[in-house]
Image (tube, rainbow, N blue to C red):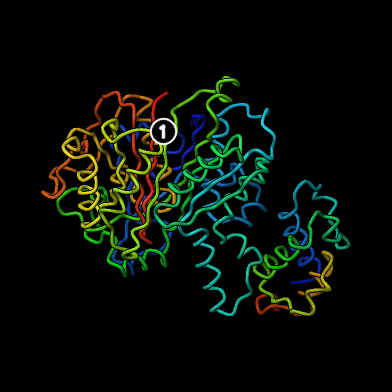
């Protein structure tokens, strides 16, 4: 999967999770809190991202994940088996 | 001071909404089918009373669904119906609006799925605990509808909703609330709960190929209860205030009694059951000779139905033969912590409509069960005082008395 494809998939995933937000405004720079996620919502979001993309966010690194782009970067650096193809 | 029922909502295997449920109950519709939600092939009891035509997305956002267990979905749906039925409650201060709910198992489906993940070394869903906790449904009802007063949850196994409705009565009588959403919810048609009850030989195992005849309280050949799921909610308030706001009144909740066997954790006890019924009737300021309908606990276990029959005979004496009794579980199975709330709605509708719903699958009664259980066909009869029974593991017995105004 190339970067553009991954980016589109992550943004589509985030768009499916937001409520009362114009999904066309979501970019890689969008921070979770700007999208209406409080801290507990963010934990749930990252859990759902793990399930959706087959990754496991490391306990320490997870604290640094604050934006859509952070998820994309993490998945790019730690690609699950089926994304390496 | 009288406490009255001004709103009702229900999600049950034979119908969602009071009209659909009551129409099915009066017509003796069977709600027991083969288990559809998971592969039940390893179970000995592969049938249940399930709710199939139900979608939480009709009233919750995707995020809210993610944060809630099925028992909470069922509870919110029933509460939403009951509040719509009750009408305008805007005159009450939110801090005077309470919730009192029962659930035996809480979010057990979430418990099962999260435990499975844990043992597979997968990450834990962050809402695991708030989904499982037994008070999750009560808390969500309060949050969704802005009811900011007392928020209680009672977990006394199969009598949970009976105790919860009784606790609501206490809140209103003692002036701690002006209106209470009361009832119960359960969603444990699940591999682990079913296996657990199977291990106690509590479930029916002989009717997997004939689910419609499996739940047969008081009948020959009954071999255990059939698991069910559902939720039922009452809106309760003081009669005077209900009349002032022009509310429609279904019935009075006149009495509540509870007693513990303190003898055996799972075996039923005649004296405990008698004590609960007696206490509820006394609490209503009445005597046993005034009771003219009983909604029996009657789960279809070989022992339980005989013990309840004996308890009714002990309390009501010769009059026991005259009192029409019915077993709602014959149609929907045993909804554990919701069952007394569903039985309460059946009792209220009996008083309200002058029709007694049947106990189905009662072609031939057990010789030891020799009362009038309203077999197979509904009867028309005006009744004024109904007792709803709920007897539970833990030796808990709870009875409620509803009356016409």
Residue B274 vertical position relative to residue B375 in the rendered view, above or below: below
Rendered position, B385 above or below B228: above
Secondary element type, mark 1: helix
Query: Horizontally, is B219 left or right of B288 in the view?
Result: left
Quadrant for the C terminus of chain B in the image: top left
Residue placed farthest to the left in the image? B367
For the point 43% across and 46% down, the residue is B162
Q: Name the residue nearer the viewer: B228 or B239.
A: B239
The percent position of residue B311, horizontal first and vertical second, equals 24, 48
| Number of other residues with Cα within 10 Å of mark 1, as a class: few under 14, some 14 to 19, many 20 or more | some
In the image shown, does B287 or B252 lie closer to the viewer?
B287
Location of mark 1 (residue): B20
Q: Position of residue B29 (x, y in %)?
A: 30, 38
Quarter of the image holding residue B268?
bottom left
Return the residue nearer the eye: B305 or B8: B305
Please report the residue visible at 76 percent of the width from the left and 74 percent of the height from the top. A75
In this picture, residue B124 sits left or right of residue B226:
right
Residue placed at 16% from the left, 47% from the top? Answer: B369
Left or right? Give the position of B283 relative to B60.
left
- Could you say where residue B227 lies in the image, as x and y percent from the top left? 35, 55
Q: Is residue B52 above or below residue A77?
A: above
Pointer 1 chain: B
């Amino acid at each position: 999967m190339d970067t553009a494809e991954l980016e589109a998939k992550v943004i589509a995933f985030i768009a499916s999770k937001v409520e009362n937000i114009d999904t066309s405004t979501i970019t890689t720079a969008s921070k979770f809190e700007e999208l209406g996620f409080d801290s507990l919502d963010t934990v749930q979001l990252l859990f759902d991202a793990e399930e959706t993309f087959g990754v496991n966010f490391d306990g320490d690194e997870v604290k640094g994940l604050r934006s859509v782009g952070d998820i994309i970067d993490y998945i790019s650096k730690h690609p699950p088996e089926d994304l390496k193809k | 001071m009288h406490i009255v029922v001004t709103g009702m909502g229900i999600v049950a295997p034979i119908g969602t909404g009071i009209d659909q449920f009551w129409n099915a109950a009066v017509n003796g519709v069977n709600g027991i089918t083969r288990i559809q939600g998971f592969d039940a092939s390893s179970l000995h009891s592969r049938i249940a009373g399930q709710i199939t035509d139900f979608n939480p997305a009709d009233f919750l956002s995707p995020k809210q669904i993610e944060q809630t267990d099925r028992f909470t979905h069922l509870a919110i749906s029933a509460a939403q119906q009951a509040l719509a039925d009750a009408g305008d409650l805007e005159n009450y201060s939110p801090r005077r609006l309470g919730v009192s709910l029962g659930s035996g198992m809480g979010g057990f489906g979430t418990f099962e799925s999260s435990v499975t993940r844990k043992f597979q070394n997968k990450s834990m869903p962050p809402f695991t605990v708030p989904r499982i906790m037994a008070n999750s449904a009560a808390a969500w009802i309060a949050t969704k509808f802005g009811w900011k007063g007392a928020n209680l949850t009672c977990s006394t196994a199969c009598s949970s909703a009976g105790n919860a409705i009784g606790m609501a009565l206490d809140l209103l009588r003692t002036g701690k609330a002006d209106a209470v959403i009361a009832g119960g919810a359960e969603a444990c048609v699940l591999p682990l709960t079913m296996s657990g009850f199977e291990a106690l030989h509590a479930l029916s195992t002989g009717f997997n190929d004939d689910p419609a005849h499996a739940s047969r309280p008081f009948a020959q050949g009954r071999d255990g209860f059939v698991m069910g799921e559902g939720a039922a909610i009452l809106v309760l308030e003081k009669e005077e205030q209900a009349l002032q706001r022009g509310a429609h009144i279904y019935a009075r909740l006149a009495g509540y009694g509870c007693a513990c066997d303190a003898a055996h954790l799972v075996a039923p006890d005649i004296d405990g059951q008698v004590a609960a019924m007696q206490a509820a009737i006394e609490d209503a300021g009445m005597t046993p000779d005034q009771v003219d309908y009983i909604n029996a606990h009657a789960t279809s276990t070989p022992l339980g139905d005989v013990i309840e029959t004996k308890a009714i005979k002990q309390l009501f004496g010769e009059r026991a033969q005259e009192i029409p009794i019915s077993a709602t579980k014959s149609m929907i199975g045993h909804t554990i912590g919701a069952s007394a709330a569903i039985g309460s709605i059946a009792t209220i509708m009996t008083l309200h409509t002058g029709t007694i719903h049947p106990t189905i699958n009662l072609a031939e009664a057990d010789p030891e069960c020799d009362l009038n259980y309203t077999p197979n066909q509904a009867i028309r009869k005006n009744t004024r005082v109904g007792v709803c029974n709920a007897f539970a593991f833990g030796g808990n017995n709870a009875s409620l008395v509803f009356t016409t105004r």
